[in-house]
């Protein structure tokens, strides 16, 4: 089973230039998770609402149209679908959707960006803490896989210019320390597990500076799997050959 995650930076824009079709053909997902959809279901065409063979589930922002939003598509019908963490200030931005399967929980999250001032960094850090507590509660029932745009590069190897970004949100010590906490709790960064020394492997590039052309990027999109489930994970990959967003898809293959 292949599970794929992608920050699409606007789902509706993928219909242009064949990006939606190339994504599905290029990654062949059994389940796929999207972030930053920037649309509610009533704004989407049939190709996004009901792609052949998939059940589709959406969580969109209640505070601003065309903002945030996540979606989950699955060939396997989930046992249960959850929308948010049950905390209004986090749920109203449409940042989390989860699905329960027979052997695991899958959480798809679009974690906040810490830019736009101290209040958003504070919001991001509180979201981080609430999310990990939420995941740990679900973990008591069955193993947890979580994926999405975490909006933080963990180590220096995970971005092209670490020294220049030491004071930039997305690479601040407190943001990186939260990922340390996730790892300490027993969650495995699947890409790094399979590619421990791989450099220049990124999932996000700034569009305005054409950074993708030069591969000046950040690895801020992840799959984390709890250690007790890791034996089932056979691959963890990044797909820089898939275009259509300022991010590229990431994936895991499980047995």
Image: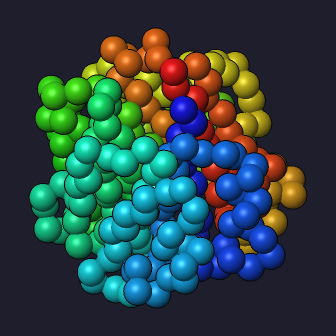
Could you tell whether 4 is left or right of 187 in the image?
A: right
| 203 over 186 or under it: above or below | below
Number of numbered discs visible in the structure rendering: 0
Indicate the quadrant containing the N terminus: top left, top right, bottom left or bottom right: top right
| 139 over 72 or under it: above or below | above
- The residue that appears at 54% across and 56% down in the rendered structure is 53
Could you tell whether 126 is left or right of 205 in the image?
A: left
Could you tell whether 92 is left or right of 157 in the image?
A: left
Taking the image as drawn, is residue 113 in sight? Answer: no
- The residue that appears at 18% across and 68% down in the rendered structure is 89
- The residue that appears at 26% across and 53% down in the rendered structure is 81
Residue closest to the far front: 53
Residue in the foreground of this view, choosing between 251 and 221: 251
Q: How is the image coloured?
A: rainbow
Residue 116 at x, y percent in the picture: 42, 72
Residue in the foreground of this view, choosing between 75 and 43: 75
Residue in the foreground of this view, choosing between 254 and 183: 254
Residue in the foreground of this view, choosing between 10 and 184: 10
- The residue that appears at 66% across and 33% down in the rendered structure is 237
Taking the image as drawn, is residue 182 in sight? Answer: yes
Residue 196 at x, y percent in the picture: 64, 18
Residue 83 falls in image quadrant: bottom left
Residue 148 at x, y percent in the picture: 46, 49
Residue 13 at x, y percent in the picture: 65, 79
């Amino acid at each position: 089973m292949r599970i794929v995650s992608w920050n699409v930076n606007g789902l509706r824009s993928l219909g242009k230039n064949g990006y939606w079709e190339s994504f599905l053909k290029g990654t062949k997902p059994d389940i796929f998770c999207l972030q930053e959809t920037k649309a509610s279901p009533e704004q989407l065409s049939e190709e996004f609402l009901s792609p052949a063979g998939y059940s589709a589930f959406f969580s969109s922002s209640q505070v601003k149209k065309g903002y945030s939003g996540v979606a989950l598509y699955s060939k396997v019908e989930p046992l249960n679908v959850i929308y948010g963490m049950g905390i209004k200030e986090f749920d109203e931005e449409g940042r989390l959707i989860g699905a329960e399967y027979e052997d695991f929980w899958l959480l798809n999250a679009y974690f906040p960006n810490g830019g736009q001032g101290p209040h958003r960094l504070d919001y991001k850090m509180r979201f981080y803490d609430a999310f990990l507590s939420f995941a740990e509660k679900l973990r008591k029932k069955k193993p947890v896989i979580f994926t999405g745009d975490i909006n933080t590069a963990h180590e220096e190897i995970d971005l092209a210019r670490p020294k220049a970004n030491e004071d930039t949100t997305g690479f601040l010590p407190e943001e990186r320390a939260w990922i340390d906490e996730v790892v300490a709790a027993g969650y495995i960064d699947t890409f790094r597990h399979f590619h421990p020394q791989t450099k220049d492997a990124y999932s996000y590039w700034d569009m305005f500076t054409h950074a993708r052309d030069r591969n000046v990027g950040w690895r801020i999109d992840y799959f984390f799997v709890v250690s007790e489930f890791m034996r089932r994970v056979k691959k963890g990959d990044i797909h820089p050959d898939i275009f259509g967003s300022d991010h590229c898809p990431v994936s895991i293959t499980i047995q």
